[in-house]
Image (cartoon, helix red, strand yellow):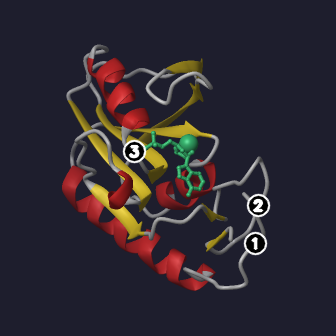
């Protein structure tokens, strides 16, 4: 597979959308104690930009998930940074919502830790590929059913550092 020359979303378009999301989250969570939990590795670029557009005090944490080779339905938490979930209004931040399996599993695990609320913010959404019913609260952009890369998203570990969004072809 090769990197396409077509730019799906430019650096400027992404920056503008992230500003809008930050504004919306700030309005929705005004006056609430808020915690942002980024799912590694893909979301780290988005988290870094998004939190700087949220005008509220926020706690930040990260966790990493492993996907089993045996079944797409087998996932587990690999790494969990020191982070309090109990009593907070949690914003789970993902790079892309694809089948929904990762986020369905995670929200179930996190709900057991007693947060006041859980919201999902995903940079990208591929609704065509959904296998489990999960509704994100905030979506950066919908994307077509292609393997997208850039702005944190990879193909075989590469291209996370591209500042724009493109795809493999
Ligand atoms: P899920 O299928 O919704 O569980 O998504 C699992 C994970 O697959 C996402 O968090 C991404 O890390 C990865 N992923 C899914 N689609 C893409 C893509 O188009 N590009 C890069 N990573 C992807
Ligand atoms: Mg991921």
Q: What is the crowding at mark 2: few (fewer than 14 residues within 10 Å), some, or many (at least 20)?
A: some
Name the quadrant containing residue 103.
top left
The nearer-to-camera label among 3 and 2 is 3
Would you say the beta carbon of the disc 3 residue lies within 8 angstroms of ligand 1?
yes
> What element does badge 1 sit on?
loop
Work out how far the residue at label 1 is from the one at label 3, CA to CA, in angstroms: 23 Å
Q: Earlier in the sequence, mark 1 or mark 3?
A: 1
Q: What is the crowding at mark 3: few (fewer than 14 residues within 10 Å), some, or many (at least 20)?
A: many
Q: Earlier in the sequence, mark 2 or mark 1?
A: 1
Q: Which residue is mark 1?
A: 3
Q: Earlier in the sequence, mark 3 or mark 2?
A: 3
Q: Which residue is mark 3?
A: 99
Please provide percent x and percent y for residue 155: 71, 54
Rendered residue at 36%/73% (across/down) = 20
Q: What is the crowding at mark 1: few (fewer than 14 residues within 10 Å), some, or many (at least 20)?
A: some
Q: Which residue is mark 2?
A: 159
> What element does badge 3 sit on?
loop
Rendered residue at 76%/64% (across/down) = 1
105 relative to 30 in the view: left or right: right
Please provide percent x and percent y for residue 111: 27, 21
Q: Is residue 22 visible?
A: no
Name the quadrant containing residue 107.
top left
> What element does badge 2 sit on?
loop
């Amino acid at each position: 597979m090769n990197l396409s020359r077509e730019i799906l979303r430019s650096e400027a378009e992404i920056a503008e959308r992230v500003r809008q999301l930050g504004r919306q989250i700030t309005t929705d969570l005004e006056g609430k104690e808020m915690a942002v939990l980024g799912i590694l590795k893909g979301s780290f670029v988005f988290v870094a930009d998004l939190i700087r557009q949220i005008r509220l005090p926020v706690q930040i944490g990260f966790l990493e998930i492993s996907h089993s080779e045996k079944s797409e339905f087998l996932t587990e938490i690999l790494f969990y940074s020191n982070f309090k979930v109990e009593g907070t209004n949690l914003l789970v931040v993902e790079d892309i919502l694809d089948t929904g399996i990762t986020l369905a599993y995670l929200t179930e695990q996190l709900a057991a830790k007693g947060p006041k609320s859980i919201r999902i913010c995903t940079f990208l959404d591929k609704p065509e590929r959904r296998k489990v019913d999960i509704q994100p609260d905030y979506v950066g952009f919908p994307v077509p059913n292609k393997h997208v890369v850039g702005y944190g998203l990879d193909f075989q570990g590469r291209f996370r550092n591209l500042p724009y969004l493109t795809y493999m072809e």
